[in-house]
Amino acid sequence: MEHRGEPGQQYGQEHWPHPPVTAERRAVSEEESRRANGPDWDRYADEYQATHGDFLGDVGFVWGPEGLTEADAGVLGPLAGRDVLEVGSGAGQCSRWIRGQGGRAYGLDLSHRQLQHSLRIDEATGITVPSVRGTATALPFADASFDIVFCAFGALQFVADIATAVAEAARVLRPGGRFAFSITHPTRWMFPDDPTEAGLTATQSYWDRTPYVEVDDETGAIAYVEHHRTLGDWVSLLAAADFRLTTLLEPEWPPDHERLWGGWSAVRGRLTPGTAVFGADLAG
């Protein structure tokens, strides 16, 4: 995903109504992250759906700005008859597509406004995605409720207590279940958030895991937070929760794809990866 003028890449949130902010790099708690990012997405949801809704599709599953679809990637495996949870479901486009494939998909999102958009699309398509408001670090579901848990750019970069979120995915999965997610490719944190050639020059350390924070200039409150982990961090997190990594995709930028999405662009995408897609299986 693509944030304003700093590394970290927040998925397209560059122009919504927002108070003046100052960018910082500093430690923040899970509570601070959640308190900032929920309202931030509420403010941005209308513009996000208006700007990117056609690309995402009302009944579509796109893993990232490159346009890689689950229909082509097959990261989740067979869907028919499976119980599926989408964490950070937004307007439910991915879950709606899964229901069209015969899966029983459910959504969860921190943003009330995004879930309202899910209801709007439910009415337009006739495909209902039962959804709840909640957080990835405290999933409101019983143990072993799902065959698949996934997150398509929806939540994990905004979570401070990421080990808890991964453990929660493991808890609600049945033995042998599938956990899959897409994030900004960790190497993108080295580069400024600029879709032009200027965004191809590394300006900070890949190993600096200090969160990116925006502070409201008027109130001093934290208005937005994003967290960075290295590829090695993600492998370790999955292993610690008894997952076996089976898939790591780094989608290439399609030659005829000219969409500009925040810091994602053909200029950058043809030279360096912007998205990483992980797939892992829980120990049986």
Image (cartoon, helix red, strand yellow):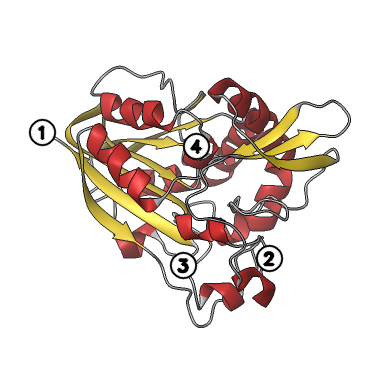
Q: Image quadrant for the C terminus?
A: top left
- In percent of width and height, residue 128 lies at 47, 36
Can residue 126 be seen?
no
Q: Secondary structure at mark 4?
A: loop
Q: Secondary structure at mark 1?
A: loop
Sequence-wise, the earlier of marks 2 and 1 is 2
Return the disc, 3 or 2, that comes first in the chain's sequence. Answer: 2
What secondary structure is marked by label 2?
A: loop
Front disc: 2 or 1: 2
Do residues under tags 3 and 1 come within 8 Å of each other at their CB atoms? no
Residue under numbered circle 2: 194
Q: Nearer the viewer, mark 3 or mark 1?
A: 3
Q: Amino acid at mark 4?
A: Gly
Mark 3: which amino acid?
Answer: Pro
Question: N-terminal of the two: label 4 or label 3?
Answer: 4
- Given the image, on which type of amino acid does mark 1 rest? Gly
For label 4, the crowd category at 10 Å Cα-Cα, with few meaning under 14, some 14 to 19 and many 20 or more, is many
Local secondary structure at mark 3: loop
